[in-house]
C-alpha cells in the first residue's frame, strides 16, 4: 500500500492552551473589526437599484465589467443569458435615475446597441428578509449538526464541540471579509454553508477513529486515544485538504470576478476548518471530560445497555467447612485407628 506521509506521533493535546489562546485573540480581534469597520453587505441585504439591459450583439462580461469600472462605483453584474445582463448598485430609492444614467453612460463606451428593459429598486424590506433567511439557514444547519453528531456518538458533548468549531470557522470567515471589506452576497452565504459541511466531515472522521480506538484500547487514557486518532487520520486530512485548497486556488485566480469572493470564502473556511478540527474540537472534548480522566463520559460504549432486572448477580462462593480436628489429629486418622483396634 502506497503512503504519502510517514506515521506521526505528535502530542496535539500538549498545546491545547496555545490553541485556546489563539482562538480567543481572534475572537477579540473580530469583535474590534466588526465595531470599527463592519461588514460590507451586498445589495441582496441592503437594497439598491437594478438596471436590466439587453444587447443586440454578444458582448463579453469582462468588457462590461471594465466599462462599469470606469464609473468608479461598486457594481454587481449578473448574466441572464441571451445577451441580457443585470447591473446592480447599492443606494437609496432617490438614486434610481442617477444609477441608470451612470450605467447607460458606461455601456455606451462599448459601441454595441442595447436596450434598457427595466429599472427596479430593491427595498430594505426585501434586504432584511434576505438577511433573516440567511441567518436562519445558518442557525438551523448548526442545530441539525448538533443533533446528528450527538445521535451518532451518543453524547451531546461531541456534537456541541463540533458546532463550536463550526461557529469558529464561520466567525473567522466573517473576520476575513470585514478585514478585506469584500462584499457579502447570497453566493458568499452559500460558501459559508459549504464550509460548515466540509468542516464537520473532518470532525466526524476523527470522532469515528476515537470511538474505534476506545473499543480496541479500553485501558488507554482519553488523551492517548485522541492523540493516536489524530495522528492516524492526519495523512488523510492533509491529502484531502490539499486537494480542495488546490482546486480553490485555481478557482480564485482563474474563475473570474463572479466566483472570486466565493473562492476566497472557501479558502479561508477550509484552511480554518482543518485547524479547528485538530486544535479546537478534540481539545474541547478532552477538557470537558475533566482532563480525560472520565473516559466513559466521552463516548457511549459499544455494548448495549442491559434491561432492568437482568443484571448478573455476583456468585457467592460457599466456604468449605474445615474438617473437625481433635487434640490427637484429624478425624479421619482417629476413625482408621478405631477400625484397626476392632480387627
Image: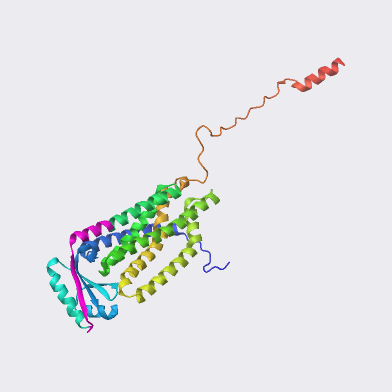
Q: In which quarter of the image is the C terminus?
A: top right
Colour approach in the figure: rainbow
Q: Residue 30 appears at what percent x and percent y?
A: 27, 62
Residue farthest to the bottom, as pictured: 111
Q: Is residue 68 above or below residue 196?
A: below
Tell whether 6 sits left or right of 69. right
Taking depth in this image into account, of 238 and 219 the one nearest to the observer is 238
**Position of residue 156 measured from the top left corner of the image (x, y, whole percent):** 40, 47
Seen in the picture, residue 305 relative to 228 is either above or below; the reply is above
Above/below status of 230 relative to 180: above
Q: Is residue 197 left or right of residue 216?
A: left
Position in image of residue 23 (x %, y %): 34, 59
Residue 278, quarter of the rendered image: bottom left
Q: Quadrant of the N terminus?
A: bottom right
Q: Residue at x 34, y 60 (%)?
A: 193
Residue that appears at 42% across and 68% down: 244
Residue range highlighted in magenta: 110-133
**Residue most toward the top?**
342
Amino acid at each position: 500500500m502506497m503512503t504519502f506521509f510517514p506515521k506521526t506521533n505528535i502530542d496535539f493535546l500538549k498545546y491545547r492552551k496555545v490553541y485556546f489562546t489563539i482562538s480567543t485573540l481572534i475572537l477579540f480581534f473580530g469583535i474590534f473589526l466588526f465595531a470599527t469597520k463592519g461588514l460590507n453587505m451586498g445589495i441582496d441585504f441592503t437594497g439598491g437599484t437594478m438596471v436590466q439591459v439587453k444587447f443586440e450583439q454578444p458582448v463579453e462580461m469582462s468588457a462590461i465589467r471594465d466599462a462599469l469600472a470606469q464609473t468608479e462605483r461598486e457594481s454587481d453584474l449578473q448574466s441572464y443569458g441571451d445577451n441580457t445582463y443585470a447591473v446592480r448598485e447599492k443606494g437609496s430609492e432617490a438614486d434610481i435615475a442617477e444609477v441608470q444614467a451612470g450605467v447607460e453612460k458606461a455601456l455606451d463606451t462599448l459601441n454595441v446597441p442595447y436596450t434598457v428593459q427595466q429599472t427596479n429598486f430593491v427595498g430594505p424590506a426585501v434586504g432584511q428578509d434576505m438577511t433573516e433567511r440567511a441567518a436562519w439557514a445558518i442557525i438551523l444547519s448548526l442545530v441539525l449538526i448538533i443533533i446528528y453528531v450527538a445521535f451518532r456518538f451518543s453524547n451531546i458533548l461531541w456534537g456541541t464541540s463540533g458546532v463550536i468549531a463550526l461557529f469558529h470557522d464561520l466567525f473567522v470567515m466573517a473576520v476575513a471579509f470585514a478585514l478585506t471589506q469584500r462584499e457579502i452576497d447570497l453566493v458568499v452565504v452559500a460558501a459559508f454553508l459549504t464550509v460548515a459541511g466540509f468542516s464537520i466531515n473532518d470532525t466526524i472522521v476523527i470522532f469515528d477513529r476515537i470511538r474505534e480506538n476506545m473499543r480496541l484500547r479500553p485501558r488507554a487514557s482519553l488523551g492517548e486515544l485522541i492523540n493516536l486518532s489524530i495522528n492516524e487520520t492526519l495523512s488523510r486530512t492533509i491529502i484531502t485538504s490539499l486537494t480542495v485548497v488546490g482546486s480553490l486556488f485555481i478557482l480564485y485566480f482563474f474563475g473570474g470576478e463572479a466566483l472570486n469572493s466565493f473562492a476566497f470564502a472557501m479558502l479561508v473556511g477550509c484552511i480554518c476548518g482543518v485547524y479547528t478540527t485538530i486544535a479546537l474540537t478534540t481539545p474541547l472534548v478532552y477538557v470537558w471530560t475533566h482532563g480525560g480522566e472520565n473516559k466513559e463520559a466521552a463516548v457511549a460504549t459499544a455494548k448495549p445497555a442491559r434491561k432492568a432486572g437482568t443484571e448478573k448477580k455476583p456468585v457467592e462462593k460457599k466456604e468449605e467447612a474445615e474438617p473437625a480436628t481433635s487434640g490427637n489429629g484429624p478425624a479421619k486418622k482417629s476413625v482408621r485407628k478405631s477400625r484397626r483396634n476392632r480387627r
